[in-house]
Image (spheres, rainbow, N blue to C red):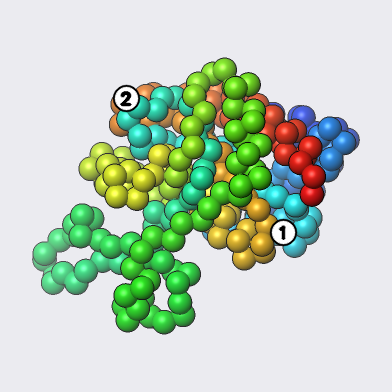
Amino acid sequence: MDIEIGKLTASLDGMKREEIADWTFWSGTVDGRRVIVSKTRRGMANASAATAIAAEHYHPAAIINQGTSGGHQPDLHVYDIVVGKESVNLGAFRTPFRALGQGSSFADWGPIDQLRSEASISLDPNARTMHRFRGDDSLLAAARAVSDRYGKGRVVEGVIGSSDTWNSELDRIRRFHEEFGTTVEEMETAAAAQVAESFRIPILGVRVLSNNITNDGAYDARTADACQEYVLEVVKRYVKTPL
């Protein structure tokens, strides 16, 4: 969203804007190194498309997918930042058979790894796990190195859950957190990570808690600026890393 990229675009020296189909990219330099800011738009399909376009058009050395998120972990608070050691697709589930009139129960749904094989999910028991996209070690190191510069909350490492669903059922959120280790949820990182993995581009998700329904943490739009300020520090640190 616009509130998630404004500070980053303003930080670019010699900034130029380019539109490709429905996606917008801003290019410029940070500390003398070329940096592209992408407005992916909301959702898994948009994030996938924007990442693929960027990979083909700009050939980035690394990708950081950043923005706001909702908390899954009760001891985290609004303005805390989660650096994604992993990201997972919280929309990849297989439901058991239930006859007409028997209703639906999310507690009985099982995860599927849509990347495990080309066999039917119903026939491949090895695919009944949740695929985990790992954050790049060098990007993680850069994020750790500047974590003490963030003064608006804690910086922790965790698991970013992504899907096109906005979850507000606390039992469902608790299952995600306890069974799959999710720290926050949003709608883009795992999709961008899946595309980046296919292009062999290092990627890291960074998400600020803009709200946390598990502890009544109310939404604050200003968290988007705070996340960008931290991400800019990560970028400045990372561009100093020898390639």
| CA neighbours of label 2 inside 10 A, class few (<14), some (14 to 19), many (20+) | few
Picture quarter containing residue 217?
Answer: top left
The residue that appears at 60% across and 22% down in the rendered structure is 148
Q: Quadrant of the N terminus?
A: top right
Q: Is residue 31 left or right of residue 75?
A: right
Marks 1/2 in contact by CB < 8 Å: the verdict is: no
Residue type marked 1: Ala
Q: Is residue 189 left or right of residue 113?
A: right
Residue farthest to the left? 101
The residue that appears at 44% across and 53% down in the rendered structure is 88
Picture quarter containing residue 56?
Answer: bottom right
The residues bearing labels 1 and 2 have C-alpha atoms spaced at a distance of 39 Å
Taking depth in this image into account, of 208 and 220 the one nearest to the observer is: 208
Residue type marked 2: Asp
Rendered view: 182 above or below 233: below
Residue 56, visible in the rendered structure:
yes
Check disc 2 and report its element: helix, strand or loop: loop
Residue 221 numbered mark, or none: none
Check disc 1 and report its element: helix, strand or loop: helix
The residue that appears at 72% across and 55% down in the rendered structure is 54
Residue 205: where, in percent of width, then height? 56, 44
Rendered view: 108 above or below 83: below
The residue that appears at 39% across and 60% down in the rendered structure is 130
Residue 7: where, in percent of width, then height? 69, 29
Residue 55 numbered mark, or none: 1
Residue 164: where, in percent of width, then height? 44, 52
Picture quarter containing residue 170?
Answer: top left
- Judging by the rendered image, the residue that carries numbered circle 2 is 216
